[in-house]
Amino acid sequence: MNQSQTAKSIFLPLAVVAAMIALWVVVYASGAFHESAFPSPLAVLRGFGEEMRNGRLINDLITSLFRVSCGFGLAVLLGIPMGLWVGLKLGARLAFLPIINFFRNLSPLAWMPFAILWFGVGDAPAIFLIFLAAIFPVILATMAAVANIPTVYFRVAQDYGLVGLEQLTQVTVPAIMPQLITTLRVTAGLSWLVVVAAEMIAGRDGLGFAVMDSRNGLRTDLLVVEMIVIGLIGIVIDRLLVQLTRIPSVRWGYER
Protein backbone atom coordinates (compact mmCIF):
# COMPACT_ATOMS: atom_id res chain seq x y z
CA MET A 1 0.00 0.00 0.00
CA ASN A 2 1.52 3.35 -1.10
CA GLN A 3 1.38 6.59 0.88
CA SER A 4 -1.64 7.87 -1.03
CA GLN A 5 -3.66 4.74 -0.28
CA THR A 6 -2.55 4.82 3.35
CA ALA A 7 -3.69 8.43 3.70
CA LYS A 8 -7.05 7.62 2.12
CA SER A 9 -7.53 4.59 4.38
CA ILE A 10 -7.16 6.93 7.36
CA PHE A 11 -8.85 10.09 6.09
CA LEU A 12 -11.95 8.57 4.47
CA PRO A 13 -13.15 6.63 7.55
CA LEU A 14 -12.51 9.70 9.73
CA ALA A 15 -14.53 11.82 7.30
CA VAL A 16 -17.43 9.36 7.46
CA VAL A 17 -17.32 9.35 11.28
CA ALA A 18 -17.26 13.17 11.33
CA ALA A 19 -20.26 13.27 8.99
CA MET A 20 -22.17 10.85 11.21
CA ILE A 21 -21.46 12.92 14.32
CA ALA A 22 -22.56 16.07 12.48
CA LEU A 23 -25.81 14.33 11.47
CA TRP A 24 -26.22 13.22 15.09
CA VAL A 25 -25.89 16.84 16.27
CA VAL A 26 -28.37 18.07 13.65
CA VAL A 27 -31.00 15.46 14.57
CA TYR A 28 -30.58 16.21 18.28
CA ALA A 29 -30.80 19.97 17.71
CA SER A 30 -33.96 19.55 15.64
CA GLY A 31 -35.83 18.36 18.72
CA ALA A 32 -37.36 15.43 16.85
CA PHE A 33 -36.63 13.19 19.85
CA HIS A 34 -36.74 13.80 23.57
CA GLU A 35 -33.31 13.95 25.20
CA SER A 36 -34.12 10.87 27.29
CA ALA A 37 -34.61 8.89 24.06
CA PHE A 38 -31.88 10.50 21.95
CA PRO A 39 -28.89 11.78 23.96
CA SER A 40 -26.60 14.45 22.58
CA PRO A 41 -22.95 13.74 21.71
CA LEU A 42 -21.94 15.96 24.63
CA ALA A 43 -24.09 13.92 27.04
CA VAL A 44 -22.52 10.71 25.73
CA LEU A 45 -19.05 12.20 26.18
CA ARG A 46 -19.88 13.13 29.77
CA GLY A 47 -21.26 9.63 30.31
CA PHE A 48 -18.02 8.13 29.00
CA GLY A 49 -16.06 10.23 31.48
CA GLU A 50 -18.36 9.12 34.30
CA GLU A 51 -17.91 5.45 33.42
CA MET A 52 -14.14 5.82 33.24
CA ARG A 53 -13.94 7.59 36.58
CA ASN A 54 -15.93 4.96 38.46
CA GLY A 55 -14.05 2.15 36.71
CA ARG A 56 -17.17 0.25 35.69
CA LEU A 57 -16.56 0.42 31.95
CA ILE A 58 -13.05 -1.02 32.24
CA ASN A 59 -14.19 -3.82 34.56
CA ASP A 60 -17.08 -4.75 32.27
CA LEU A 61 -14.80 -4.66 29.23
CA ILE A 62 -12.22 -6.93 30.87
CA THR A 63 -14.96 -9.35 31.93
CA SER A 64 -16.45 -9.59 28.44
CA LEU A 65 -13.04 -9.99 26.79
CA PHE A 66 -12.12 -12.76 29.25
CA ARG A 67 -15.28 -14.68 28.38
CA VAL A 68 -14.79 -14.28 24.65
CA SER A 69 -11.13 -15.29 24.88
CA CYS A 70 -12.00 -18.47 26.79
CA GLY A 71 -14.98 -19.52 24.67
CA PHE A 72 -13.45 -18.64 21.31
CA GLY A 73 -10.04 -20.01 22.26
CA LEU A 74 -11.50 -23.37 23.28
CA ALA A 75 -13.52 -23.52 20.06
CA VAL A 76 -10.41 -22.91 17.96
CA LEU A 77 -8.25 -25.37 19.92
CA LEU A 78 -10.82 -28.15 19.53
CA GLY A 79 -12.49 -27.13 16.27
CA ILE A 80 -9.43 -27.00 14.02
CA PRO A 81 -8.14 -30.52 14.90
CA MET A 82 -11.66 -31.90 14.56
CA GLY A 83 -12.10 -30.16 11.21
CA LEU A 84 -8.79 -31.57 9.97
CA TRP A 85 -9.80 -35.07 11.02
CA VAL A 86 -13.26 -34.86 9.45
CA GLY A 87 -11.81 -33.28 6.30
CA LEU A 88 -9.11 -35.90 5.83
CA LYS A 89 -11.20 -38.97 6.70
CA LEU A 90 -14.09 -39.72 4.37
CA GLY A 91 -15.75 -42.07 6.86
CA ALA A 92 -15.68 -39.44 9.60
CA ARG A 93 -17.08 -36.86 7.19
CA LEU A 94 -19.99 -39.08 6.20
CA ALA A 95 -20.73 -39.93 9.82
CA PHE A 96 -20.43 -36.53 11.49
CA LEU A 97 -21.25 -33.92 8.85
CA PRO A 98 -25.06 -34.10 9.30
CA ILE A 99 -24.89 -33.65 13.09
CA ILE A 100 -22.31 -30.86 12.78
CA ASN A 101 -24.59 -29.04 10.33
CA PHE A 102 -27.53 -29.55 12.69
CA PHE A 103 -25.77 -27.88 15.62
CA ARG A 104 -24.31 -25.16 13.40
CA ASN A 105 -27.82 -24.11 12.40
CA LEU A 106 -29.08 -24.17 15.99
CA SER A 107 -28.84 -20.71 17.56
CA PRO A 108 -26.49 -20.77 20.56
CA LEU A 109 -28.97 -18.58 22.43
CA ALA A 110 -31.43 -21.49 22.29
CA TRP A 111 -29.11 -23.15 24.80
CA MET A 112 -29.51 -20.25 27.22
CA PRO A 113 -32.01 -21.98 29.57
CA PHE A 114 -29.77 -25.04 29.84
CA ALA A 115 -26.68 -22.89 30.29
CA ILE A 116 -28.30 -21.15 33.26
CA LEU A 117 -29.56 -24.43 34.75
CA TRP A 118 -26.20 -26.15 34.35
CA PHE A 119 -23.81 -23.32 35.18
CA GLY A 120 -25.86 -20.67 36.97
CA VAL A 121 -24.93 -17.08 36.13
CA GLY A 122 -21.52 -15.54 35.62
CA ASP A 123 -18.61 -16.57 33.42
CA ALA A 124 -19.42 -20.24 32.78
CA PRO A 125 -22.73 -19.92 30.87
CA ALA A 126 -21.39 -17.13 28.66
CA ILE A 127 -18.22 -19.11 27.85
CA PHE A 128 -20.35 -22.17 27.08
CA LEU A 129 -22.57 -20.24 24.66
CA ILE A 130 -19.60 -18.61 22.92
CA PHE A 131 -17.98 -22.02 22.55
CA LEU A 132 -21.12 -23.42 20.91
CA ALA A 133 -21.40 -20.41 18.61
CA ALA A 134 -17.81 -20.74 17.39
CA ILE A 135 -16.84 -24.40 17.28
CA PHE A 136 -19.17 -25.69 14.57
CA PRO A 137 -18.35 -22.96 12.00
CA VAL A 138 -14.65 -23.57 12.69
CA ILE A 139 -15.03 -27.32 12.17
CA LEU A 140 -16.96 -26.88 8.92
CA ALA A 141 -14.60 -24.23 7.54
CA THR A 142 -11.54 -26.35 8.32
CA MET A 143 -13.17 -29.40 6.77
CA ALA A 144 -14.14 -27.49 3.61
CA ALA A 145 -10.68 -25.96 3.29
CA VAL A 146 -9.04 -29.39 3.54
CA ALA A 147 -11.42 -30.80 0.92
CA ASN A 148 -10.50 -27.97 -1.47
CA ILE A 149 -6.73 -28.55 -1.33
CA PRO A 150 -5.56 -29.52 -4.84
CA THR A 151 -4.44 -33.15 -4.94
CA VAL A 152 -1.23 -32.10 -6.68
CA TYR A 153 -0.05 -30.64 -3.36
CA PHE A 154 -0.17 -34.07 -1.75
CA ARG A 155 1.48 -35.74 -4.75
CA VAL A 156 4.38 -33.32 -4.59
CA ALA A 157 4.61 -33.83 -0.83
CA GLN A 158 4.81 -37.58 -1.31
CA ASP A 159 7.50 -37.13 -3.95
CA TYR A 160 9.53 -35.25 -1.36
CA GLY A 161 8.91 -37.92 1.24
CA LEU A 162 6.51 -35.88 3.36
CA VAL A 163 4.01 -38.16 5.07
CA GLY A 164 2.02 -38.18 8.27
CA LEU A 165 2.71 -35.29 10.64
CA GLU A 166 5.21 -33.64 8.27
CA GLN A 167 2.63 -33.54 5.48
CA LEU A 168 0.03 -32.15 7.89
CA THR A 169 2.23 -29.33 9.21
CA GLN A 170 4.05 -28.44 6.00
CA VAL A 171 1.33 -28.91 3.39
CA THR A 172 -2.19 -29.22 4.79
CA VAL A 173 -2.16 -26.53 7.47
CA PRO A 174 -0.41 -23.83 5.35
CA ALA A 175 -2.79 -24.59 2.46
CA ILE A 176 -5.94 -24.06 4.55
CA MET A 177 -4.75 -21.02 6.52
CA PRO A 178 -6.04 -18.26 4.17
CA GLN A 179 -9.58 -19.67 4.24
CA LEU A 180 -9.32 -20.50 7.93
CA ILE A 181 -8.25 -16.98 8.91
CA THR A 182 -11.29 -15.54 7.13
CA THR A 183 -13.51 -17.94 9.09
CA LEU A 184 -11.80 -17.02 12.37
CA ARG A 185 -12.50 -13.33 11.70
CA VAL A 186 -16.19 -14.01 11.08
CA THR A 187 -16.46 -16.39 14.03
CA ALA A 188 -14.69 -14.01 16.40
CA GLY A 189 -17.22 -11.33 15.47
CA LEU A 190 -20.05 -13.79 16.10
CA SER A 191 -18.53 -14.69 19.48
CA TRP A 192 -18.40 -11.02 20.45
CA LEU A 193 -22.09 -10.67 19.57
CA VAL A 194 -23.01 -13.77 21.56
CA VAL A 195 -21.19 -12.68 24.73
CA VAL A 196 -23.11 -9.40 24.75
CA ALA A 197 -26.42 -11.22 24.26
CA ALA A 198 -25.57 -13.81 26.92
CA GLU A 199 -24.61 -11.11 29.44
CA MET A 200 -27.84 -9.26 28.77
CA ILE A 201 -29.84 -12.32 29.80
CA ALA A 202 -27.70 -14.29 32.25
CA GLY A 203 -25.02 -11.91 33.42
CA ARG A 204 -24.25 -9.91 36.52
CA ASP A 205 -21.45 -7.96 34.87
CA GLY A 206 -19.89 -7.40 31.46
CA LEU A 207 -20.84 -5.05 28.64
CA GLY A 208 -24.09 -6.85 27.88
CA PHE A 209 -25.23 -6.53 31.48
CA ALA A 210 -24.20 -2.87 31.44
CA VAL A 211 -26.42 -2.31 28.38
CA MET A 212 -29.43 -3.78 30.18
CA ASP A 213 -28.63 -1.88 33.37
CA SER A 214 -28.41 1.42 31.47
CA ARG A 215 -31.69 0.69 29.72
CA ASN A 216 -33.44 -0.15 32.99
CA GLY A 217 -32.05 3.00 34.57
CA LEU A 218 -33.12 5.12 31.57
CA ARG A 219 -29.51 6.23 31.09
CA THR A 220 -29.46 6.36 27.30
CA ASP A 221 -26.21 8.34 27.39
CA LEU A 222 -24.46 5.39 29.06
CA LEU A 223 -26.27 3.02 26.71
CA VAL A 224 -24.72 4.78 23.72
CA VAL A 225 -21.30 4.73 25.42
CA GLU A 226 -21.50 0.96 25.81
CA MET A 227 -22.72 0.49 22.23
CA ILE A 228 -19.77 2.51 20.92
CA VAL A 229 -17.31 0.51 23.02
CA ILE A 230 -18.81 -2.80 21.85
CA GLY A 231 -18.47 -1.76 18.21
CA LEU A 232 -14.90 -0.48 18.63
CA ILE A 233 -13.72 -3.63 20.42
CA GLY A 234 -15.24 -5.72 17.62
CA ILE A 235 -13.14 -3.75 15.12
CA VAL A 236 -10.00 -4.22 17.23
CA ILE A 237 -10.55 -7.99 17.46
CA ASP A 238 -10.96 -8.19 13.68
CA ARG A 239 -7.83 -6.09 13.06
CA LEU A 240 -5.79 -8.33 15.36
CA LEU A 241 -6.86 -11.43 13.45
CA VAL A 242 -6.03 -9.72 10.15
CA GLN A 243 -2.40 -9.62 11.33
CA LEU A 244 -2.31 -13.41 10.86
CA THR A 245 -2.35 -12.80 7.11
CA ARG A 246 1.13 -11.26 7.43
CA ILE A 247 2.66 -14.60 8.42
CA PRO A 248 5.07 -15.52 5.57
CA SER A 249 3.64 -19.02 5.14
CA VAL A 250 0.13 -17.57 4.89
CA ARG A 251 0.68 -14.42 2.85
CA TRP A 252 0.90 -16.29 -0.45
CA GLY A 253 -2.78 -17.17 -0.22
CA TYR A 254 -3.69 -13.46 -0.39
CA GLU A 255 -1.26 -12.54 -3.17
CA ARG A 256 -2.11 -15.11 -5.79
Image (cartoon, rainbow, N blue to C red):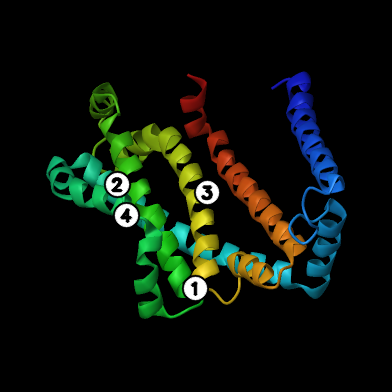
Task: Report the mark closest to the observer, 4 or 2.
Answer: 4
Which residue type does callout 2 highlight? Gly
Residue 49 rendering spot, x and y as whole percentages: 84, 64
Task: Report the mark closest to the observer, 4 or 3.
Answer: 4
Q: Earlier in the sequence, mark 3 or mark 1?
A: 3
Q: Which residue is mark 1?
A: 202
Alpha carbon separation for disc pair 2 and 1 = 31 Å
Q: Earlier in the sequence, mark 4 or mark 3?
A: 4
Alpha carbon separation for disc pair 3 and 1 = 20 Å
**Looking at the image, is 208 positioned above or below residue 236?**
below
Q: Secondary structure at mark 4?
A: loop
Q: Nearer the viewer, residue 224 or 77?
A: 224
Q: Which residue is mark 3?
A: 189
Give the tally of numbered discs. Answer: 4
Q: Which residue is mark 2?
A: 83
**Dot 3 alpha-carbon crowd within 10 angstroms: few under 14, some 14 to 19, many 20 or more:** some
Q: Secondary structure at mark 3?
A: helix
Q: Is residue 101 left or right of residue 18?
A: left
Checking the image for residue 49, the label placed there is none
Alpha carbon separation for disc pair 4 and 1 = 19 Å
Which residue type does callout 1 highlight? Ala
Which residue type does callout 3 highlight? Gly
Residue 66 rendering spot, x and y as whole percentages: 56, 66
Please tell me which residue is depicted at 67% across the width and 55% down the height of the picture. 227
Q: Earlier in the sequence, mark 2 or mark 1?
A: 2
Task: Report the mark closest to the observer, 2 or 1.
Answer: 1
Q: Earlier in the sequence, mark 4 or mark 2?
A: 2
Please tell me which residue is depicted at 72% across the width and 67% down the height of the picture. 57
